[in-house]
Image: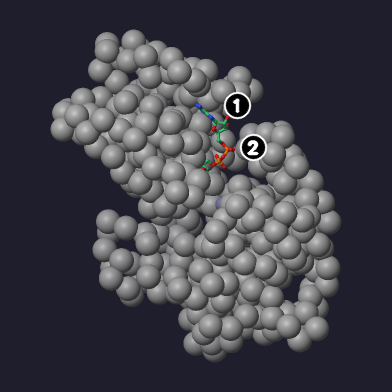
Amino acid sequence: MKMRAAVLEEFGQPLAVQEVELAEPRAGEALVRLVACGVCHTDLYTASGADPSGYAPTVLGHEGAGVVERVGADVTSLSPGDHVVTLFSPQCGECIHCLDPRTNLCLAIREQQNEGFLPDGTTRIARDGEGIRHFMGCSTFAEYTVMPEIALAKIDPEAPLEHACLFACGLSTGLGAAINTAVVTPGSTCAVFGAGMVGLGAVAGCRLQGAERIVCVDLSLERLELARGQGATDVIRGGEGAVEQILEMTDGFGVDYSFEATGNVAVMRQAVEAARMAWGLCTVVGVAGKGETLDIVPRLLITGRRLAGSSFGGVKGRDQVPLLIERYLAGEIHVEPFISHHLSLDEVNRGFELMEAQDGIRSVIDLG
Ligand SMILES: NC(=O)c1ccc[n+]([C@@H]2O[C@H](COP(=O)([O-])OP(=O)(O)OC[C@H]3O[C@@H](n4cnc5c(N)ncnc54)[C@H](O)[C@@H]3O)[C@@H](O)[C@H]2O)c1
Ligand SMILES: [Zn+2]
Ligand SMILES: [Zn+2]
């Protein structure tokens, strides 16, 4: 079939929205009609050419939500009409990691996905007979996509898809960092560095876990206001003095749980330093630049601080994204404030411009 899609032709150049061909789903795959897709930093990171593992041409986008249109052979858990959220982090349910409650890092299709192919090592997208690679196994800046069954989370059809799409990446990442990775305890104190989509999700996750005090740190006053709306009890302007301020607010000890959601290694260090001696846990979520390293004084660890990292918030996508969607439908998670702009597919490059200008938290592309 023919469809419109935003193709990254050349790094550093605007995406080109055009007609491409999409093949039918093969065994274990589903064809999804996309309804909405968020614009995330990772799309921009790849488009810019900064990502050393990037490839082109490819159809970008990975924060998608839509409706299953057709399924290939051997697909048992999805049917036409099902509402789904796309998962760049799949859940096969059978690999050694899927079987272990400690991680969400499914091993099933990593290699092929990293290369831009579906699990059988081929692509479903083409133009003039030339294959175009899939991005993060998703390629959701398009009217349709073909994805593996194990990378689609079936959700409650009551959930508006223009909100549900945010659970495909940033929001679940932040929520999950607090709920799954740190497992924040009721009555605890928390500090979240960064109030973008991920940090705000972590603030919301701390609130859902029953944290008593949630300090959010960012450079933008506007974003700190949004953090209050998600449950931050205190807000601090980021920069040199942020750690001292957090220590002052916590009788000199620091917080039980700190989170880093900026991608800046100097801020990661601050997040470790803001964690309490004896048991403070720092969870790093931000993605640092290539080759950058984290510099911390080992004594901070010897005296009981712990450091963890979190990919997609430790969320096992097929099982847990639907549960997060249920909490959203129950009114526990406020998605509307994150969406600052609605764009058409043709305006996808505007989404990147808005992101670079830090105008709003998320632009959502309406594809329906
Ligand atoms: N681990 C994962 O699975 C995963 C998934 C998605 C995104 N990420 C990463 O999470 C990070 C955050 O993503 P985002 O979409 O929220 O980005 P974002 O750019 O919207 O938010 C980052 C925020 O950090 C703030 N900031 C910058 N410098 C600061 C400082 N010195 N002190 C305090 N705040 C500061 C910015 O003002 C901004 O609000 C990125 O590095 C992204 O790549 C990780
Ligand atoms: Zn993303
Ligand atoms: Zn697996």
Quadrant position of residue 34: bottom right
For marks 2 and 1, give the CA distance: 8 Å
Does 266 sit left or right of 165 as displayed? left
Q: Where 134 falls versus 105 (above or below)?
A: below
Which residue is situated farthest in the front direction here? 291
Measured as percent of width and height from the top left, residue 235 is found at 49, 18
In the foreground, 277 or 298: 298
Some atom of ligand 1 lies within 8 Å of the CB belonging to the residue at label 2: yes
Quadrant position of residue 81: bottom right
Residue that appears at 47% across and 62% down: 89
- Could you tell me the amino acid type at mark 1? Arg
The residue identified by callout 1 is 223
Res 220 visible = yes
Mark sitting on residue 361 = 2
Res 68 visible = no
Measured as percent of width and height from the top left, residue 118 is found at 55, 78
**Crowding near pointer 1: few (<14 within 10 Å), some, many (20+)?**
many
Quadrant position of residue 46: bottom right
Q: Where 178 falls versus 324 (above or below)?
A: above
Quadrant, the C terminus:
bottom right
In the foreground, 365 or 212: 365
Mark 2 lies on a secondary structure that is loop
Quadrant, the N terminus:
bottom right
Q: How many marks?
A: 2
Some atom of ligand 1 lies within 8 Å of the CB belonging to the residue at label 1: yes
